[in-house]
Image (tube, rainbow, N blue to C red):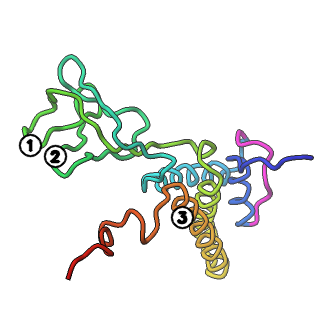
Amino acid sequence: MPTISAMTELEAVNEMLMSIGQAPVNTLAVTGIKDVSIARARLSSMTRRVLSRGFNFNTDEDYPLTPDSEGIILVPEGTLKIEGMSATDDFTTRRHPKGLALYNKTDRTFTFPAGITVKIVWAFAFEDCPETARCYIATAAGRRFQSKAIGSQILDRFEEEDEMKAWLLLERDERGQRKTNLFRNNATLAGFGSRSY
């Protein structure tokens, strides 16, 4: 029995091309069709934009970062966002001669005396994302591509509906992976049934 594989970058770009009435292509290395390179750029941009939100599949919590011999903590390659794990962590990312590094805002220095743990959101290539993320990214990129190339309000309404459906599927998968809902892992409702009046 044949199996269906996950969406490829080529398929996503072809969906985008077909949304503006262009014929699909057999390869992304095609020359002479400007819309292919524009579609690829829009898909790449949308991938980064969506992944920067931070999903369960591209986020690591309590990720250890260790300073080098000079106390500098370089930001790992492929990082979209980095945050401290506690409210007292006061750092940001800034350009250092060695590259993008963590900056200690409390002490106003790039030097850290010891390693720290962070929450880090990773950038992935389109084809390294789960299928629901690929579907949403391709739909959202296609909608913006069509909007810039043709600007049809009628097509935009149809694509807006498809984008919303794809987003809901992605959010459903995210909730399932995080195993959270309104009643579990909710600080506001924690201890709701144990109050004494």
Instruction: State the image coordinates of residue 130 (x, y, percent, origin top left).
Output: 61, 50
Residue range (magenta): 21-29
Instruction: State the image coordinates of residue 84 (x, y, percent, origin top left).
Output: 25, 45
Q: Closer to the camera, 25 or 98? A: 98
Q: Which mark is residue 106?
A: 1
Identify the image quadrant of residue 154: bottom right
What is the three-letter code of the residue carrying label 2? Asp
Looking at the rendered image, the quarter that the C terminus falls into is bottom left
Element class at badge 3: helix
Task: Say left or right for 178 vs 64.
Answer: right
Q: CA distance from mark 2 to mark 1?
A: 6 Å
In the figure, 159 relative to 139: above or below? below
The chief SS type of the magenta part is: loop
Q: Closer to the camera, 134 or 130? A: 130
Residue shown at 80% from the left, 58% from the top: 23
In the figure, 11 relative to 22: above or below? above
Q: Are marks 2 and 1 in contact (CB under 8 Å)?
A: yes
Q: Which residue is mark 3?
A: 171
Q: Which mark is residue 90?
A: 2
